[in-house]
Image (spheres, rainbow, N blue to C red):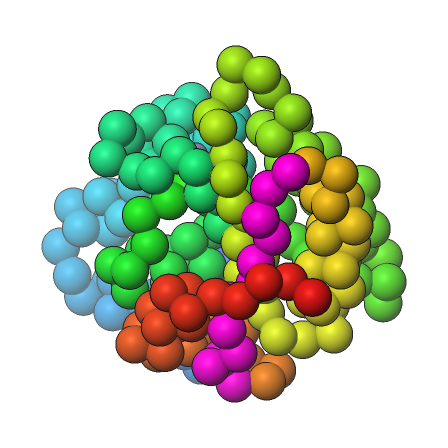
Amino acid sequence: MEFPSKLIEDAVNEVAKLPGIGKKTALRLVLHLLKRDEEQTQTLAESLVAMRSKVKHCRKCHNLSDNDLCSICASHKRDRSLICVVEDTRDVLAIENTAQYKGMYHVLGGIISPVEGIGPSDLHIESLIERLRDPDGDAIKEVILALSPTMEGDTTAFYLQKKLRTFSIKISTIARGVPIGGDLEYADEVTLGRSILSRISYE
Ligand SMILES: [Zn+2]
């Protein structure tokens, strides 16, 4: 692609580094920004920089948050006896969208994947154990494993179940209404909501 401007070329190259965006789309977006008020681009750039530098992970559940504790962990309206274990923040959003779950979460920050070299120690598993062990913490009665029905998801669930078995809590898994090989975030809200309500004991 020949660019009439080095500045445009730089912007296109940066935008094209985002996943799912090719050079053509990047150019379209950049030209769109040039057509809009300069102030709008300023606002966009500032919100991205602020988001990148200020968003943190909740110290309790590792969900993305603006504060030390995320809005779910800080809420008094949630059922603290339930922890739903998910791979990442997108799963929290998907489950929250169903409006069927009122418990807490624990975000692993990934999934066990030997192929990608991700082992248990790369995930927030120890802090989950700590939450169960903490005598001053919440009285947790049940941990729901809401992981993708993939080989990696199954491996992670199996590993967690072995670790959690030592505690006298119920361990359950979401029902398999979710299509095999599909990620939680792509499951439709009704199916996902139903699968959380009709969760089953982990065998
Ligand atoms: Zn939290």
Looking at the image, is 147 positioned above or below residue 130?
below
Asked if residue 143 can be seen in this view, the reply is yes
Answer with left or right where residue 52 lies relative to residue 41. Answer: right
Asked if residue 51 can be seen in this view, the reply is no
The image position of residue 80, as x and y in percent, is 40, 34
The image position of residue 106, as x and y in percent, is 53, 42
Q: Which residue is at the far front?
A: 168
Looking at the image, is 74 positioned above or below residue 202?
above
Q: Is residue 152 shown in magenta?
A: no
The image position of residue 2, as x and y in percent, is 51, 78
Q: Which residue is at 60% across, 52% downward?
A: 171
Answer with left or right where residue 97 lies relative to residue 184. Answer: left
Question: Which is more toward the observer, 74 or 65?
Answer: 74
Bounds of the magenta span?
A: 168-179
Q: Which residue is at the far bottom?
A: 179
Q: Which residue is at 46% across, 59% downward?
A: 91
Question: Which is more toward the observer, 201 or 67?
Answer: 201
The image position of residue 14, as x and y in percent, is 51, 58
Tell me which secondary structure the magenta stretch mostly adopts: loop
Image quarter for ligand 1 equals top left
Answer with left or right where residue 158 lies relative to residue 173. Answer: right
Question: Which is more toward the observer, 51 or 32?
Answer: 51
Question: Which is more toward the observer, 171 or 74?
Answer: 171
Q: Which residue is at 26% across, 28% downward?
A: 76
Q: Give the position of the C terminus as an image quadrant.
A: bottom right
Q: Which residue is at 58% across, 62% downward?
A: 201
